[in-house]
Image (cartoon, helix red, strand yellow):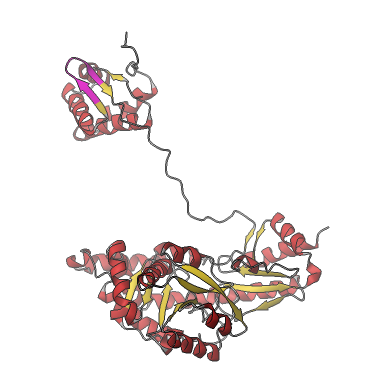
Amino acid sequence: MTPSGTNPGPEPGSAAWELLLPAASAPPRARGRALQSALREAVRSGRLARGTRLPSSRDLAADLGVSRGLVTEAYEQLTAEGYLRSGRGAGTWVSAAVRAARPRARDLAAHPPGVRADFVPGTPDLSLFPRAAWAAAQRGVLAELPHHDLGYPDPRGLPRLRTALAELLARRRGVVADPERLVVVSGVAQATALLGLALHARGTVAVGVEDPGSPRHGALYAAAGLSTVPLALDAEGLAMEPLASSGVRTVVTTPAHQFPTGIAYSARRRAELLDWARSVDGFVVEDDYDGDFRYDRAPVGALQGLDPERVAYTGSVSKSLAPGLRLGWLLVPEALAEEVVERKRTTDLGHPTLDQALFARFVERGDYDRQLRRCQRAYRERRDALVSALGEHFPGARVSGIAAGLHVIVGFPVRYGPRDRFLARTAAAGVEVRELTEYAHARDVRGAHIRLVLGYAQMSPARIRDGVRLMAEAVASG
């Protein structure tokens, strides 16, 4: 008989009992820890329900074939932790304070949609990640890293990496790269958040963003307490008249290869943008998200090189290596430097030192330059394959924007419409695409014309050609 409102203990052969059996066969020195772990998991999972009376230490030891002292120690440990309760002469019970553990962790990361052809922009080819070179750099770093570098780092980043990045960015992107004003960050997202917090502390309430533009900017600045003001583009870049009348004093731009329209800011517009920033005592945030990838000529240098006191420059390895590395950089104007560095310190006490040392070695030994050349060759080939396939299967379709980056803009003649039918049939064929209108901020610009933003970096040339063919066949059917 068991007291009213309680549960009898587990019977040999029950599911709860079976959780304990592996502990009995563990190596002798690990047997006590194994039994404690098994009991703890049985309580957490709910297999040993609240209010369940456990067998006496003598009985459980006999059933499991272990020493009574081992069971007694396990009961005492879990009682101290709050999983069990006991009283003199009253036995041992599962505590009422314990709640069943939640289901296993879900994976909230974005995953490929499982379609036949995925033209969604923004994803590099992760199979190009240089595993062998990265592993070699990792081994080298672990062998040579001084012990003191494993302590809390300078919140700006390891001096070794900041020095290597400054040289790399000056050489490849034409920036004015002072290692003292370079901050290693967890990608452009953290750079944006740090800048937003620094601007908010200075009294800024809103920043301008390109329209169309990256949909992520709004949420990132909102988290820092700032609103965003959509600003229209023209053929040369950010239109100056709407910017001047907006009242903002900071604007976020992608001048080397505007996302998503694919244009490059003209020299005149770059100069006008900097004149505006000086006139309002403001700043330009330059997101150089794919500046290394230009296929028809040498890339245009970064805007920051023209006025490093008015331009905050951000970049990362998300397109060149992998976004999962969460590794980027921020060159910050002197007026914002102290606030940004302090925000970085209080946010995470600095980027992981092993990752920094590894990437510094990767840059110093020329591996990063080799990776950029490898990606550039692959992505140029894929862009050419996409343009060729569009010309073959969609005569009259127009590819706009410069030959750069990881996506193109394609405008389709009206004969391929109507728009809704085009999109519905493309989706039904298992071809994933994005309309240009999806990157517009709070404006209804749909109309009758079909303009798609097609990413190509994540697919082989053969898959690209097959995807365009599938799309053409779907649109032409019926």
Q: Is residue 70 above or below residue 183?
A: above
When asked about the image quadrant of residue 29, the answer is top left
Q: Is residue 32 left or right of residue 395?
A: left
Whether 439 is among the magenta residues is no
Q: How many marks?
A: 0
**Which percent across, then down, holds residue 281?**
41, 84
Instruction: Locate residue 427, reporting x and y percent.
Output: 69, 57
Q: Residue furthest top?
A: 1
Q: Is residue 302 visible?
A: no
Tell which of 206 and 186 is nearer to you.
206
The picture quadrant where one finds residue 154 is bottom left
Q: Position of residue 399 (x, y in %)?
A: 67, 77
Q: Is residue 89 magenta?
A: yes
In this orientation, which residue lies closer to the viewer: 93 or 459?
Answer: 93
Which residue is at 29% across, 72% downward? 341
Can you name the residue that lies furthest to the right here?
478
* 362 vs 271: above or below: above
- Identify which residue, 317 or 247, lies in the foreground: 247
At x 31% / y 79%, what residue is drawn?
181
Please report the bounds of the magenta region as a residue range. 85-92
Q: Is residue 416 visible?
A: yes
Instruction: Find residue 478 and report its image quarter.
Output: bottom right
In the displayed structure image, the side of residue 118 where residue 93 appears, left or right: left
Majority secondary structure in the magenta region? strand
Please determine whether, in this image, residue 234 is positioned above or below residue 448: below
Rendered-image quadrant of the N terminus: top left
Horizontal and vertical percent position of residue 380? 57, 77
Residue visible at 60% across and 79% down in the picture: 233
